[in-house]
Amino acid sequence: MKPTRSRYWVVVFAVALSILSYIDRVAMSKAAPYVRHDLNIDAAVMGRIFGAFGLGYALFEIPSGFLGDWMGPRKVLMRIVIWWSAFTAATGWMWSATVMRLVQFLFGAGEAGCFPNLTKAFTTWLQPNERTRAQGIMWMSARWGGAFTPLIVAYIFKFANWRAMFSVIAVPGIIWAVLFYRWFRDNPHDHPKVNAAELELLAANKALAGSHRDVPWLRLITSRSVILLWVQYFLISYPWYFYITWLSTYLKEYRGIHDDVKSGIYAIVPLFSGGLGCLLSGYLVPRVSTALRSVTFARRLIATLGFLGAAVFLVVCIRTADPRWSMAAMGAASFCNDLVMPPAWGACMDVGGKYAGTLSGSMNMMGNLAGFVAPQVGGIILARNGGDYAPFLYTMALAYLLGALCWPFIDPVTPLKHKET
């Protein structure tokens, strides 16, 4: 019997959702100058609004990842997408900075757990040799969704203001949630479109499906590799959050690009380049692993080179006056940044095993704590330096250098051992 290919629809749904998640969050970056004008707020307050999303996302990552391990990703992702779509629309209804911060916090809280639960679905539905590649494709799609958001928003601005724009981009999420809930099953054995031959391919995953409440928390918080995965993800997310928060304002106020469409084209570069990095890394890791006969060394090598390359190119960006070449260097930094993504999320699947949702949720929590810290640090630095972005960008380059020091000490393949009671 020829195996069906139903498992690849999980990747299709993941790609679609990752695109939608980044459209919804990057839209605020493009709308920020108009939000600041209409609500009469300065850079520091805008930084706190950006940070509120990151804080809500971070605080609810572990609970949402744990729920995916416990209840399965089908119900949890349905809740996540409906919630965040509702608060995407609500963002356009805000009348003050205080209420906007509250809604952005709730928006982040609702979106938390999206990628950990997709990772849980990959762990259950895909063969081990397909998972890292799927992560690369998913994160490439997320980056590209964010990359083209400024142009999408600029086009919507021709017909509507920023308030109506948030209602427009909320609709596709509702459609996704309905279609996903109707098609997906937490266990491939329960899906009518999966035949026996495909189930045989996924036989090793059978123990990973179902409810897993007994998370080995002590082993999780005392594992050197887990702690370093958390640290490196904070350090890679700290500079990356610039691309989805301050970038549009940076292009307009610091680089002098005031036209929305032209600014949108420039804003494509970092996230589009990051998507290429995700895709390349997802394909390189298995091949380098085979060539070197070590998944551990391949993941360490590619992630370390990614951090170092990002630091170098970001310094080049800071020291380049021409906006075109400066954005090219920022794009190269983002490309190197995202070489780290498939090794990091692949490590969550292999180290976490049946607890992949919880482990990836904890790692993504640290990344979104950086999303809480970075925009506010940026707002404070800009307020104190008269809008000079260089000091802020140098803190980002330093984060990349520190991240490179983590990976040589991470074991990205050995599962957490848990004594059954």
Image (cartoon, helix red, strand yellow):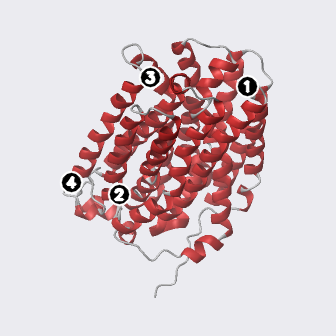
Quadrant hosting residue 174: top left
Residue type, numbered disc 4: Lys
Closest to the camera, between mark 4 and mark 1, is: 1
Q: CA distance from mark 3 to mark 4?
A: 38 Å
Along the polypeptide, which appears first: circle 4 or circle 2? 2
- What's the residue at 31%, 61% (across, down)? 186
Give the Cα distance between marks 2 and 1.
41 Å
What residue is shown at x 52% (from left), y 25% (from top)? 30
Q: Residue at x 62, y 14 (%)?
A: 257
Give the labeled residue for mark 3.
153
Mark 3 or mark 4: which comes first in sequence?
Answer: 3
Labels 3 and 1: the sequence-earlier one: 3
Q: Quadrant of the N terminus?
A: bottom left
- Which numbered disc, 3 or 1, marks the residue closer to the eye? 1
Foreground of the two, 271 or 100:
100
Quick one: label 2, few (<14), some, or many (20+) residues within 10 Å? many
Circle 2 sits on which residue? 76
- Side (left or right) of 116 relative to 369: left
Q: Is residue 163 above or below residue 259?
A: below
Q: Position of residue 390 (x, y in %)?
A: 77, 29
Determine contact: label 3, label 4, CB under 8 Å.
no
Label 1: few (<14), some (14–19) or many (≥20) C-alpha neighbours in 10 Å: some
Residue 357 vertical placement versus 46 (above, below)? below
Instruction: Indicate which disc residue 387 carries.
Output: 1
Residue type marked 3: Val
Q: Nearer the viewer, residue 109 or 247?
A: 109
Q: Nearer the viewer, mark 3 or mark 4?
A: 3
Q: Earlier in the sequence, mark 3 or mark 2?
A: 2
Visible in this render: residue 242?
yes
Instruction: Tell me the kind of residue under disc 2.
Output: Val
